[in-house]
Amino acid sequence: MARHITSGEFSAVVDRHFSELGLTSAETDIAWFGLKGMSLAEIATLRQTRIGTAKAQCTAIYKKAGVNGKSQLFSQLVEDVLL
């Protein structure tokens, strides 16, 4: 499937995956920023919030996904969505 996804379709597929995880719109934004490789500090700056808030939201994302961190979240994304 991944070989056939165009950039627009990729975004839709990833958004659908995040929705299936039950992420809020804020959590979805943060997950996208993480996917783009941004640090917690960068995410907090972009969202005009504290690093602790961004960290708490990341923790909520990982809990909903049943993973322990960013690398596992995106490994799951590759496995579940792209393969």
Image: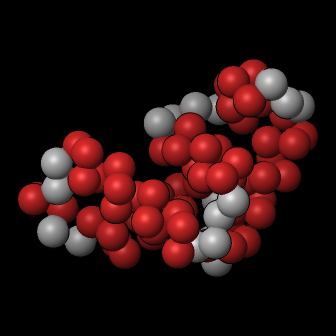
Which residue sits at x=10%, y=59%? 4
Residue nearest the observer in this picture, 64 or 74: 64
* Residue 68 appears in view: no
Which residue sits at x=84%, y=52%? 56
Q: Is residue 19 left or right of residue 15?
A: right
* Residue 19 appears in view: yes
Q: Position of residue 65 (x, y in %)?
A: 61, 73
Q: Which quadrant would the C terminus be assigned to in this image?
A: bottom left
Q: Which quadrant would the N terminus be assigned to in this image?
A: bottom left
Q: Quadrant of residue 30?
A: top right
Q: Position of residue 11 (x, y in %)?
A: 35, 49
Q: Is residue 11 left or right of residue 43?
A: left
Residue nearest the observer in this picture, 41 or 26: 26
The image shows residue 22, relative to residue 2, as above or below, that is: below
Residue nearest the observer in this picture, 73 or 19: 19
Q: Is residue 62 left or right of residue 44?
A: left
The image shows residue 22, relative to residue 28, as above or below, that is: below
Q: How is the image coloured?
A: secondary structure
Which residue sits at x=69%, y=31%? 43
Number of labelled discs? 0
Which residue sits at x=23%, y=43%? 7
Q: Position of residue 44 (x, y in %)?
A: 77, 30
